[in-house]
Amino acid sequence: MEILAKVDSLRVSDAYQKLYSRQDSQEYFNLVTEELYHQVLTAITGFRGHKAAVALEELQSIRAKAHKEGDAKLQSFLSKLIHVRYDQAWPCPLSLNDKMPPIPVHFLHSDGTVEALDLAQYSRRAGTGALVLFAGSWT
């Protein structure tokens, strides 16, 4: 929790706000934040290389772990962090092997016509057998 608290305080510091303001690009914001996590992680733990990468992955998945395990103390701590307070992401309501809900996909044919399909129809047409979908939004 020390690492998360330190990253949280640095993210809103003048120095990091100036750094974030240098470019208006989500990719740039992500790079700055990732570098911040690496610096704080290394300063506090001394971890480098593979050990640091594993620790960073654990940090980045801690919200999901706290939610899954019902860790109220950790969830309370995390809810006070600025990037969590203003994050409008919620856990996915689907579980492994759930039936795919009807999500519209617009398929553009080579003749310029557009056909509306849902993901299940698209998956069957593509003949892939299984479809893995990763989705996210920064908006």
Image (tube, grey):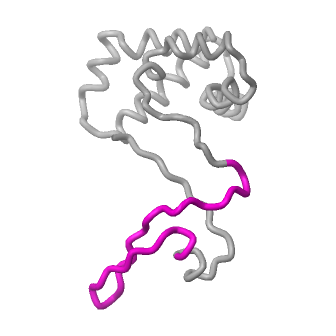
Q: Residue at x 48, y 34 (%)?
A: 89
User: Foreground residue, 86 or 59?
Assistant: 86
Compared across the picture, whether 10 is left or right of 75 comes to left
Q: Which residue is drawn at 64% across and 77% down?
A: 128
Extreme residue in the bottom direction: 111
Q: Residue at x 50, y 11 (%)?
A: 80
Residue 19 picture quarter = top left
| Position of 42 relative to 119 (above/below) | above
- Expressed as whole percent of the image width and height from the top left, the position of residue 138 reads 38, 40
Q: Which residue is drawn at 52% across and 10% down?
A: 6
- Expressed as whole percent of the image width and height from the top left, the position of residue 17 reads 30, 18
User: Foreground residue, 122 or 13?
Assistant: 122
Region rendered in magenta: 95-121
- Expressed as whole percent of the image width and height from the top left, the position of residue 44 reads 63, 11
Q: Answer whether residue 96 is magenta in the image.
A: yes
Q: Quadrant of the N terminus?
A: top right
User: Foreground residue, 100 or 50?
Assistant: 100
Q: Answer whether residue 128 is magenta in the image.
A: no
Q: How many labels does the image show?
A: 0
| Position of 81 relative to 138 (above/below) | above
Q: Quadrant of the C terminus?
A: top left
Residue 11 picture quarter = top left
Compared across the picture, whether 104 is left or right of 114 comes to right
- Expressed as whole percent of the image width and height from the top left, the position of residue 2 reads 61, 8
Compared across the picture, whether 90 is left or right of 27 comes to right
| Position of 103 relative to 86 (above/below) | below
